[in-house]
Amino acid sequence: MTELRFAERLSDLVAGVEVVLSDIWGVVHNGLVAFPEACEALHSFRAQGGTVILITNAPRPADSVQRQLRKLGVADETYDAIVSSGDLTRHFVADHPGKKMFWLGPERDNSIYRGLDTMIAPLEAADYIVCTGLFDDETESAEDYRGMMLKARERRLPLICANPDIVVERGDRLIYCAGAIAELYRELGGEVIFYGKPHRPIYERAMALAAERQSHAIELNRVLAIGDSVRTDLTGAHAFGIDCLFLTRGIHSEEFEGIDQLDPASVKELFGRPPKALMRELRW
């Protein structure tokens, strides 16, 4: 299928849908402010009996993500639960007690190991790497870490990527994420373990939480994913077997100029397999 369906409102797409798995950054906020209409849309879906699970590649535990959402003005009533790649990464760290970890990321992400039985070590002494991002994502790119990644590859250190995103919006800018370093390491021949979208574990965890709230197992044809990234949100949804509503105002906004005029070949090149529907911004 190469045809694109354009939708004006979420309410036009959720007949028979019990669960929405929504991305956060780029959908409900841009890193600086919340999107009120998007928050209202998710709240309205919940008000009619639906369950909203926020699934995010944030390299922090869910409670830390919730605190950030509150600061940005996203009300708790917008969603039922949060599943983060940070939570899944913490499970990996917890499963390797006593191992030495080299942590690559900004200080704000230190909750990734807080309270766990792990030892922070320099790269030369570490057993594995946990990457939550760049040390300074305001000024650096993945290329600044090539030398470090070459040293890690020489020691055959596995790199645990706590955020598979390559870039994310921060206001009107694109900021590099842990996924950029992980992809560089993989290109250099290093071993990478990814937690978060588009990989299956984050969807399985989200579906388990949704089933708890609905008090029954959820059929995949009654689930709708929402996101703004082809690489993570759309690819992850298709791989898991669920429909996806794709928002065009996010990190791919420049690529979607005049999207309603695209021919089938261009649609296939841009998306591979197209989403269930396109919408510029989420609204009810």
Image: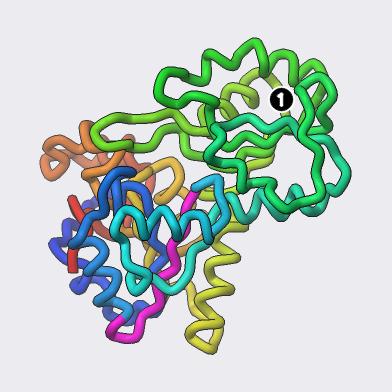
In the picture, measured across the screen, residue 19 lies left or right of residue 112, that is left
Vertical side of 258 occupied by 26: above or below: below
65 shown above or below 258: below
Vertical arrangement, residue 280 with respect to residue 18, above or below: above
Magenta segment: 47-57
| Residue 159 position in % (x across, y down) | 70, 33
Residue 1 visible in the shown view: no
- Residue shown at 20%/73% (left/top)? 11
> Is 67 situated left or right of 93 in this image?
left
Q: Identify the secondary structure beneath mark 1.
A: loop
Q: Nearer the viewer, residue 13 or 57?
A: 57
Q: Nearer the viewer, residue 121 or 158?
A: 121
Residue 56 is a magenta residue = yes
Residue 100 in sight here = yes
Among all residues in the image, which is located at the extreme top? 147
Q: Which residue is mark 1?
A: 190
Q: Residue 94 appears at what percent x and percent y?
A: 78, 53
What colouring method underlies this structural image? rainbow
Snapshot quadrant of residue 192: top right
* Residue 98: quarter of image: top right
